[in-house]
Amino acid sequence: MIVVMKMGATQEMVDRMARRIEEMGLKAHIIVGTERTVIAAVGEKRNGERETLESCEEVDKVVPILAPYKVASRETRPEPTCVTSHQLQIGNGHVGVIAGPCSVESAEQLLGTAQAVKSAGATGLRGGAFKPRTSPYAFQGLKEEGLKILAAAREATGLAVVTEVMTPGHVEMLAKYADVLQIGARNMQNYHLLQAVGDAGMPVLLKRGPSATIDEFLLAAEYILDRGNSQVVLCERGVRTFETHTRFTLPLATVPYLHERTHLPVIIDPSHGTGIASLVPPMAAAAVAAGCDGLMVEVHPDPSKALSDGAQSLTPEAFAEMMKTCRTVAEALGKELG
Amino acid sequence: MIVVMKMGATQEMVDRMARRIEEMGLKAHIIVGTERTVIAAVGEKRNGERETLESCEEVDKVVPILAPYKVASRETRPEPTCVTSHQLQIGNGHVGVIAGPCSVESAEQLLGTAQAVKSAGATGLRGGAFKPRTSPYAFQGLKEEGLKILAAAREATGLAVVTEVMTPGHVEMLAKYADVLQIGARNMQNYHLLQAVGDAGMPVLLKRGPSATIDEFLLAAEYILDRGNSQVVLCERGVRTFETHTRFTLPLATVPYLHERTHLPVIIDPSHGTGIASLVPPMAAAAVAAGCDGLMVEVHPDPSKALSDGAQSLTPEAFAEMMKTCRTVAEALGKELG
Amino acid sequence: MIVVMKMGATQEMVDRMARRIEEMGLKAHIIVGTERTVIAAVGEKRNGERETLESCEEVDKVVPILAPYKVASRETRPEPTCVTSHQLQIGNGHVGVIAGPCSVESAEQLLGTAQAVKSAGATGLRGGAFKPRTSPYAFQGLKEEGLKILAAAREATGLAVVTEVMTPGHVEMLAKYADVLQIGARNMQNYHLLQAVGDAGMPVLLKRGPSATIDEFLLAAEYILDRGNSQVVLCERGVRTFETHTRFTLPLATVPYLHERTHLPVIIDPSHGTGIASLVPPMAAAAVAAGCDGLMVEVHPDPSKALSDGAQSLTPEAFAEMMKTCRTVAEALGKELG
Amino acid sequence: MIVVMKMGATQEMVDRMARRIEEMGLKAHIIVGTERTVIAAVGEKRNGERETLESCEEVDKVVPILAPYKVASRETRPEPTCVTSHQLQIGNGHVGVIAGPCSVESAEQLLGTAQAVKSAGATGLRGGAFKPRTSPYAFQGLKEEGLKILAAAREATGLAVVTEVMTPGHVEMLAKYADVLQIGARNMQNYHLLQAVGDAGMPVLLKRGPSATIDEFLLAAEYILDRGNSQVVLCERGVRTFETHTRFTLPLATVPYLHERTHLPVIIDPSHGTGIASLVPPMAAAAVAAGCDGLMVEVHPDPSKALSDGAQSLTPEAFAEMMKTCRTVAEALGKELG
């Protein structure tokens, strides 16, 4: 940690700050520059020292050297983590593909979609039973009924079921039906929920919040890892920027950047990331080319009748077409899709 | 709602879409332009028609005419809502001032701060007992012990206690000690939590999420209002932008804009909004001049020893100075501060 | 154009507004909704009617139906434009590759780089002679001397020279040496410069400004097209968002989105788009997979000695490696790279 | 400057980097931390050392300690700069008010507006003769004819004329008629233009670009100051964020933040900053309360007939009302308005 003193800080102030740093159990190195004095504080423990030092009046700013996360970091664990469930493999040369409708609407809708995406090569099935909706007046999901339909589809197809859990009180119930618990973007910093899924001890798919920094994203993962659950999949689904022509702005550089920082696998959701069905296939192919470990794609038998997210859902035919291109790209890079 | 057809849509497509709109119980008006055809759909019920129509292949986009929120809107209730608790009055010519430390750290720290902010004119006391922290390694609050300290400070000072609730399972416990339940920015779209505080039937202070649009903010309030709880205070605390010199970017235009759209009172948190103690007083004065109904300010007896948010906390002396300026501005505008 | 009247607008106000619209030469269709009245104004000419109507007090907002650009639009010209110069082909199944150093530093540096990128498959050569630098104290380029070096490299290699022009007064000089005039991101809305390169009648590479919307980007192109110059290449080089781990956020969805809206070819600059050399190759491959018509990549013989942008420059070896992957992806999609 | 070495950098790499730093004329202090080694490089000259070091492969990142600007900085010149012209005083206890139409449309329109804003207390007159318009099809200004009308209005009223210059070739002509040359937001990084107005030796009003960081803003000012012209006024006019309900997001914290960093005066443009006439007066009052040195406000005799920016223009009556409130706030803070 580098403590930058304010312009004009006196020798006495610098000495006082150095003592303060030493009292925190760190070692202080004073470096007198031509215009500023800085103190390097060695031995940081990531437990709030930075905030404390930043609060001191004589301090201009504190620059952290270490990443704030630890267990998630590549430095702690150099080999990549691979998360698997049933046929779904995410990481380790496999680009796992999770597809299905935004919401579970009926047994027919779900089973039909599951069979279609399976034959196109998907290995995971998505479908919301509890839906976080921006408006209280929108369809909120079929709830436990929806979970039962998902479990039945798994029985029929072998696809791993990925579904969202919205609140700690539901984790136990969801865990009975689902294979992978999804934390939605809106809940990325719902810490009690992160701890609850951490305790559940099953694979977790953590979506990046639309304005979360990479550090915040990895610290959210750290909440889950910190409970002893290492099966965490990171999902980039777009960030909120000034761009409004797409629903969110999908920054694929997240994939190689995270791969340098963390051992956790990284998947891309081009459906939420663009919000426009016609943009999903090119962005899915681009995500594979960028090196992602998986895709999460919304597919609906009749998007214009979907109870949610129809505008970004592919038809089963368009999805099968998309899979062909993605498979070609994956193979060109020596990876296996699905 | 205006349905814009794609370039080159045939008469048949337009007719089919018009029938579709009529089947939804809306009235369709077809308008043939020089380059595009649009269909005005009259009678919208805000329950997902827009999404459905947007999913149709022949449709380029759907432009909503009505705001998506209803109970929160000024059109539903023209007179401004005023929220009060003990001495705290927010709205109706009163600029309520809620001040106190980021976290409750000890009985001494809290009570001392409470007395100091009260004598400077505050009418509400803030203090976190359950702290949502970005890192799992940071101080998480004193929990129920902290709540007891807050309640004791209310007994001693008469200040209304405002404190954050993080998860539905805690609402009942918090309600025993607090006067106003705060929903933090990270939880603005934690819908189960919004419903739980809605059901609690006591004043709620709802913070805007750092990347929430105004519509999303008001729809979050709508989740609370929808449970029959009308005592909702909206709090702007800064949004996340490309600017990094301040912790967040604090858009004060939110105040007059929301006043035009909703009857709910609007307060400003210049502490989180800037993240830098020296910027808090000018932004507090600016917020009052912009017409806000209240302020929420972090004050700590010794910011350099604070367990959280020290860099943005005012000393009691700086807070008293800030209050003097704010009172002058409030009075110049015919309002009462505190 | 849809004119949304304010809540509570009287019949008289609506009639007055309709007359106003008719006076502008448009046709007005009044649609009385359950909560709002809107007027559809048919016959828009894109010359400021929207702004005028938006200024009227009784009007809540005006929603445009037509895109604000015309010549750039796919509706005006359905077949894609292909821009070529020497060996460089951008569009029409060719993914043109423009590579070279950020700045021309010396004849040796440039010629060496030109030969290296050529043998790896590049068909265009980039290199700045006039450098727009954020700081007045940074290296500003070799100026005309740099242009001569670029022209010599073209003679030696056959690569088309792409170089930036910063001000209208330089267009004539630059046109003598360069094959493609580049408009940098900072100058995307420098309208006199756009007009000057429009008048120059040679290929123009227009970079998107870091906070330009797609409409603004296409309107900037429209300034060039409007002078009768149709050889315009659009270049996405990243937008400014809250993300700071990369220099900019690179939204590849721009590629398919623009392809739906405009006939102009779209290329990607992954060097500025990420600012980090190790992220350039995966993002280049992703750009090709997303369907881009070209790439613009910074290559320097010794990035650690570059006078500018070293951190995002590839070595010739890394560039050759990147080209191999990109070629595999391009071929998988039935396209030719370089 | 702090050079953070990559994880796992060997002693040899560290030594090589230290030698490299010393070769640049800086002094290197090696600090070996528990997880990382950093090298403090003392003696930075702000001429590109940072970029060079960041390009080295063994380096993770380089953290600057000094601000990149120098002449603009408060450390170089502690006393605030005051810019004056005719009756206009910006800084030094004066809140200068520049008002007038977006564009000069006719002699009658301009003179009438000038007289109205003067009697309400304005001391500067704005009005565009050369208009940078997003669309090539929009009204581009009256050009030199407009400048003559502006000069005539100055003769009649004594108001200082502030008008925008768009390209270096126009500076000489503009300088004949105007008192303050305005650089628009789109041209904030048009370096040839900045140098040209620097050379003109007359007051310059520099608008912040919509996605410019504070460092970039001050470096743009530095381009002007570097030519020996110290009469620079900084104008915050809103930044581009995900918020779309206002035209831009107006961050008033820019005012106190810049006051801590630079001696240059800071004014606010609430018209562009909000884009909505009804939000201008509260934001103008807020800007005064935040401590700004001036305001720039669009006023039009009949906003609904304005050729540009009508939606954000105040009527003369609304402007007079706004001035009353702003004056009360200014006086409450011990400042003089106008």
Image (tube, coloured by chain):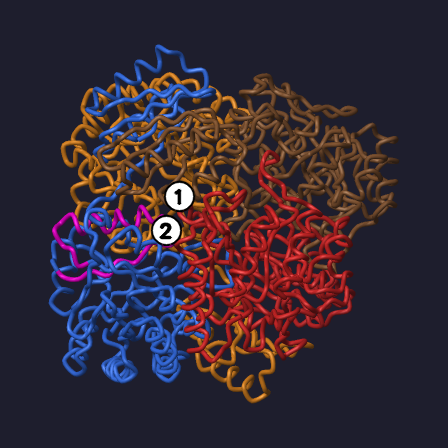
Chain colours: A blue, B orange, C red, D brown
| Label 2 packing within 10 angstroms: few (<14), some (14-19), many (20+) | many
Figure quadrant of the N terminus of chain C: bottom right
| Label 1 packing within 10 angstroms: few (<14), some (14-19), many (20+) | many
Q: Classify mark 2: helix, strand or loop.
A: helix
Q: Residue at x 46, y 74 (%)?
A: C330
Name the residue tied to disc 1: B234
Q: Percent from the top left, x then y, of residue A130?
A: 25, 65
The segment highlighted magenta reads A202-231
Query: Up-down: is C317 above or below A69?
Result: below
Q: Give the residue type that dot 2 points to.
A: Ala
Query: Up-down: is B270 above or below A129?
Result: above
- Whether callout 1 and callout 2 share a subunit is answered yes
Q: Is residue D253 magenta?
A: no
Q: Percent from the top left, x then y, of residue D16?
A: 36, 36
- Would you say the residues marked 1 and 2 are in contact, meaning their CB atoms lie under 8 Å apart? yes
Name the residue tied to disc 2: B221
Q: Give the residue type that dot 1 points to.
A: Leu
Picture quadrant where residue B115 is located: top left
